[in-house]
Image (spheres, rainbow, N blue to C red):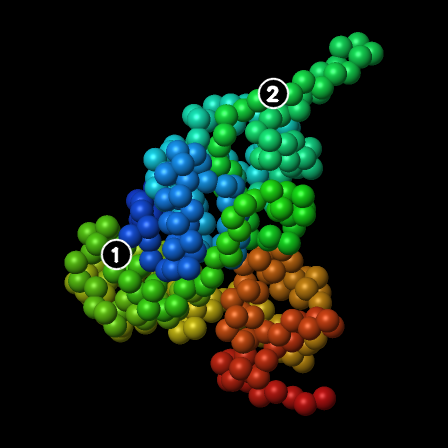
Amino acid sequence: MAKDAINTNLIMEEKEVENNLRPQDFDSYIGQEKIKNNLKIYIQAANERNEPIDHVLLYGPPGLGKTTLAGIIANSMGRSMKIVSGPAIEYPGEILAIIKQLPKGGVLFVDEIHRLSKPVEEALYSVMEDFAFDAVIENGEQTTVRRISVDRFTLIGATTRAGLLSAPLRDRFGIIHRMEYYEPEELAKIVINSAKKLAIDKVDPSGAIEIGNCSRGTPRIANRILRRVRDYAQVKADGNITKEVVDETLALLDIDQKGLDLTDRNILLTMISKFNGGPVGLDTLAAAIGEDPGTIEDVYEPYLVKCGFINRTPRGRMATDYAYSHLNMTKIEP
């Protein structure tokens, strides 16, 4: 079998496992309590009126459950949901075709909605507000605008970079929620629930909380680490997942007790060793470690800032005293 085909199969299998671990209702969805309570009220009220809820915008770092929560919203309304990626929609006519395929009151989930093209975004203004699409028809030298009505639906947008959404698009969402990082105790509950779905019988509470501690506040990472710990425990520890087994697996994965991986530590080490702790600009830092600036800003930096390893200042990024302490390095005063 070709290498590309093998990689594709592995990705599809990983995605299938991830989908099987997703909760299907609010009761089984752990964390984000304030968002859940608010959404329950909105959905109950909309169901009593027999209409879809307002358009919803979910934003926050990747892996916190935006897609899962969108599915639960659709399930709670008894509606079907279609999932599309923002960059995949190139022309306004494509978004109209997608919406036309939705059943009445259906849910359209647009991932990475901040990456919609400008023409598609502008076409959404009237669709979201008036449930009508303005089609431009050119016939020789004549240009006419035809308004095409669409059934009411709910648009759920997800983004890791809410600041990149234009104000007109953002203002058309009636419900806006920021997804927060999870506490280790919440992640431990998620790990135990996922272990049951993966038919893992021997999960010690100490092992679950250890996975929660090193999962960067992110359920997706917790589930990924759980699957790797399962493999290690199956081969080396009779399938028993304890704190010691988790620690041994993390050592193999080069993940420390705070959840920092090789790239995280490389970012901090580069800031300290090459730039004396900063301040250093994002582009300069990215060039120094050979990483994309957007990846650093969206994937790595939010957690490093949250944990107090990095401070963002007007002059650039700076490593904190906590970063020096965590890496066992001595700060050299200028």
The numbered mark, 1 or 2, whose residue comes first in the sequence reads: 2
Asked whether, in this view, residue 50 is left or right of residue 164, the answer is left
| Label 1: how many Cα within 10 Å (few below 14, some 14–19, many 20+) | some
Numbered disc total: 2
| Label 2: how many Cα within 10 Å (few below 14, some 14–19, many 20+) | few
* Residue drawn at point x = 33 percent, y = 69 percent: 185
- Res 193 label: 1
What amino acid does circle 1 point to?
Asn
- Figure quadrant of the N terminus: top left
Which is closer to the viewer, label 1 or label 2? 2
* Residue drawn at point x = 60 percent, y = 31 percent: 130
Q: Nearer the viewer, residue 4 or 185?
A: 185
- Res 301 label: none
* Residue drawn at point x = 51 percent, y = 80 percent: 327
Q: Is residue 295 visible?
A: yes
Q: Residue furthest top?
A: 140
> In which image quadrant can residue 46 be found?
top left
Asked whether, in this view, residue 134 is left or right of residue 151, the answer is right
Horizontal and vertical percent position of residue 116: 62, 39
Q: Secondary structure at mark 1?
A: helix
> In which image quadrant can residue 191 be found?
bottom left
Tag 2 residue: 148
Q: Residue furthest front?
A: 49
- Figure quadrant of the C terminus: bottom right
Q: CA distance from mark 1 to mark 2?
A: 46 Å
Q: Nearer the viewer, residue 155 or 19?
A: 155
What amino acid does circle 2 point to?
Ile
The answer to whether the residue labelled 1 contacts the one labelled 2, judged by CB atoms less than 8 Å apart, is no
Does residue 285 sit above or below 219 in this rendering?
below
Does residue 226 sit above or below 117 in this rendering?
below
> In which image quadrant can residue 291 be found?
bottom right
Q: Is residue 111 visible?
A: no
